[in-house]
Image (spheres, rainbow, N blue to C red):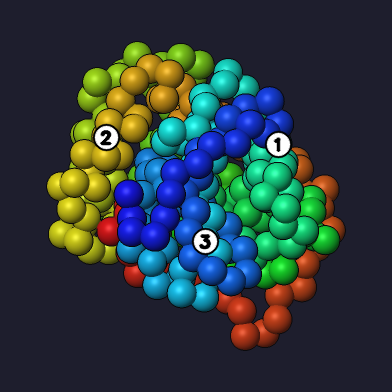
Amino acid sequence: MLEGFEDRYADVNGTRLHYVIGGEGEPLVLMDGFPLTWHGLHKIMTPLATHFRVIAVDYRGQGESDKPEGGYDKKNMAKDVYELVRGLCHEQVNIAGGDIGAMVAYGFAANYPQATKRLALWEGTPFSQIFQDFAKPFPRPGDLNLWIYPLSQVEGLPAKLLAGRFRHVIDWSAEHLALHPERISEESRAIYAQAYDTPEALTAGFGVFHTFHQDVADNDSYPRWRCPPWLSPIRAPTSCGQ
């Protein structure tokens, strides 16, 4: 465990979330994505804790949080986080997320604007039809290969194919998706591989992708936000918990 932080658990919205908390200041909720856990945030948590009360969350199905059969639409996962922060007696929080964590953070801000002070997203945006058109099932050699998305729509298959073999996915993701794969330590790779290696963890991990059609419908129902001119999408310089 990081110095100055502690593990905690909370029963919220019919499930149990694991989170790591530490620091002083305004509350800042952090979430990373697949195939990571809260550990993917460990290098930024300590410096952030000098300014914020950092709450790094394993969202539903991730890491040490429970892995129920359903509830993986991002609107419901945002409700998990909302009940967590209200249970910590915070009326308003800063919230930031990457990848799946970005989608949950956006869902939080869209559904609980009164509880959202600031929102930051990286390596992920709210899903829309534009993304569905972008995630082509037959990429050309050398193009970005988003094989996880179609596989997630085949009920039960990810667990049958990948249980006990998930280290291959971690290494492939590092080599093909990270800008600096050499910065992803053996320790981190082992942590992520262990976190997703069981059939239960894989079913939950791919469950967050299985709901994307519902996520698109939910996102389309939210009021449109006008981003300030200085704000533009960026790709983070690191990924896979570097």
Of 151 and 237, nearer the camera is 237
Give coordinates of residue 134: x percent, y percent. 52, 51
Placement of the C terminus among the 4 image quadrants: bottom left
Please tell me which of labels 2 and 1 falls first in the chain. Answer: 1
Name the amino acid, label 1: Asn
Residue 235 position by quadrant: bottom left
- Image disc number at residue 76: 1
CA distance separating discs 2 and 3: 25 Å
- Image disc number at residue 54: 3
Of 142 and 176, nearer the camera is 176
Name the amino acid, label 2: Ala
CA distance separating discs 2 and 1: 26 Å
- Image disc number at residue 193: 2
Of 50 and 40, nearer the camera is 50
Residue 233 position by quadrant: bottom right
Name the amino acid, label 3: Val
